[in-house]
Amino acid sequence: MFAASHGSHLTFFVTPGSPNPYPEILSSMDTLPTNTDSDASFQQIERWLDKCNTIHSTCWTDTPKQLPTRVLDVGQDGDAFVRLHETSGESERYICLSHCWGGYKSHVMTTSKTIAQNLRGIDMKSLPASFRDVAIIARRFGIRFLWIDSLCIIQDDRDDWEQEAAKMASIYENAYLTVAGTHGNNSNISLFSKVSDEISYRDGILQPHADRKLQIRNDKNELNTVYVRAYLPHGMEKDHAYDALLQSQLPLLSRGWCFQERLLSPRVLHYRKNEVYWECQEETTCQCSPNGQVGTLKEEYRLAAASETETETETYSSWHHIVEQYSTLDISFPKDKLPALSGIASKVQSIQKTNYLAGLWEATLLYDLTWYPTSKNKIPSDWRAPTWSWVSIGGSIRYLDADDMVFTTKLLQAHCERMGKNPTGEISGGFIRLSGPVREVSLEKQSNGTHLISGTKLDMNDGSFDVNPDIQLRNQLSCLRLGQGIRGGPTWYYFIILEVVSPGSPEYPSYKRVGLWTQYTGSSYYDEEEFVAFLQTFTVQEVRVI
């Protein structure tokens, strides 16, 4: 009758010390504070911080961390100004702000024209609301320094932007705490909110946002006070698809740039309407639920950036999951697709000691080639990465489950041309040289919409192509047999679909990737003998993919 699990939209509970008429199903927890900037909310945050500082060995150490190049000195309570401070190698605690820029155009930022004034001081009243609020939070916890991207990076200086972007991993990783304006779609929306007293209606169930008091009789017919509240979505689940409801309530979690800020930060304090919640390396918990949540993306990041003792399979599968989630997020400028992930990439690279290649890794590149788009995409108007990289297309991608693959293709060479100073940022070109079984193919579109390989009944279905397959119908294609593996009985075969770009050297013609094709033995859709004969027509060649 009274469900308190996360599977329900409603949580019923009693307050600590109060009689519990149904202890087997009712939890005991505090009621929500009326405001997220109330003393009660700050006291809860202090308890989370104290617990993390005391018993979470992977989250924080007492060793002071070096400050970023520039930070804001927030001063003390009551100070009317904050000021930009250029550091000189000193080590202190500092807080980072993660926020959506949105459509709000703040006139307060650091540029080559304003840096001198900002070093003298910035009026608190002139700051966007979320900037003022995080300064208040820093002062409340006795943290003198604060890092905010638009004020601590010179916005009209390309060199400075690239230098600081390359340090993004250490900036967020070394922060004492990252405060996230998770419910705000621009920087002028306050972090703080009053807990709403409204009641909404979703999925056929009333959703009280604030705690509602009920009078319930127990088995002895005695009246007892019970509270009910709606369980609030948090977007912490590592497989969450960021649906429309979540994007409207927690827009920060749908932004590509904020993704790495969340994963790199040891501890994130999320401000959303109606509550505050906590996410660190060892625990995720909130005010609206009595139980800490588990299974966040931070687990995947820890594996991807783990030491060499992790297996190759664990490393690449964790990276794949990070990329899959990242690819669903919004990036305002397509050219930022690599820079917005560069902090995570640089951290993983510092541990794994392998070359980073436009979102792929040299040590696991053959595995990393097994990506495919979840929906058809248009060919991007602006080049952003080689065609063998998932960065080259728009939209979300996924990877094949290819843990058992035995490769028939070898990587001979891989190279990317870095555009700026950030080694994991934008690139201007790149290629890979592969050696493996190759066969030329052409497609014939059938009346039912399928695409058969000419001279066979083998179907390259629409899902095999990175973009609309119709554009390839008039072009000569090639299949590179990447490898094969056994999954649940049949043998699966994996092919990269290539299109010649320029003949080049007869030994090393240049290709672009146009798709990923899979087939397996035992399929009722084609003649197995025909498929085996088809495989025997492949010859080992070297190809250069750009």
Image (cartoon, grey):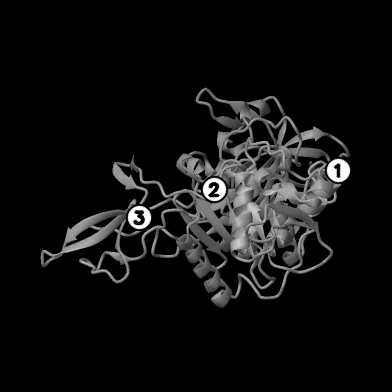
Whether residue 409 is visible here, answered yes or no, is: no
Q: Are marks 1 and 3 in contact (CB under 8 Å)?
A: no
Please determine whether, in this image, residue 113 is positioned above or below residue 168: above
Badge 1 is on which residue? 507
> Could you tell me residue 229's position as x and y percent?
33, 53
Identity, as a three-letter code, of the amino acid under mark 1: Glu
- The alpha-carbon separation of the residues under discs 1 and 3 comes to 59 Å
- The alpha-carbon separation of the residues under discs 1 and 2 comes to 30 Å
Please determine whether, in this image, residue 462 is positioned above or below residue 360: above
Badge 3 is on which residue? 7
Quadrant holding the N terminus: bottom left
Name the residue at the top extreme: 447
Looking at the rendered structure, which numbered label has been put on residue 234? none
Whether residue 133 is visible here, answered yes or no, is: yes
> Could you tell me residue 278's position as x and y percent?
52, 61
**Of the residues under marks 2 and 3, which one precedes in the sequence?**
3
Name the residue at the left extreme: 221
In-image side of 354 versus 52 (left or right): right
Badge 2 is on which residue? 520
- The alpha-carbon separation of the residues under discs 2 and 3 comes to 38 Å
Identity, as a three-letter code, of the amino acid under mark 3: Gly
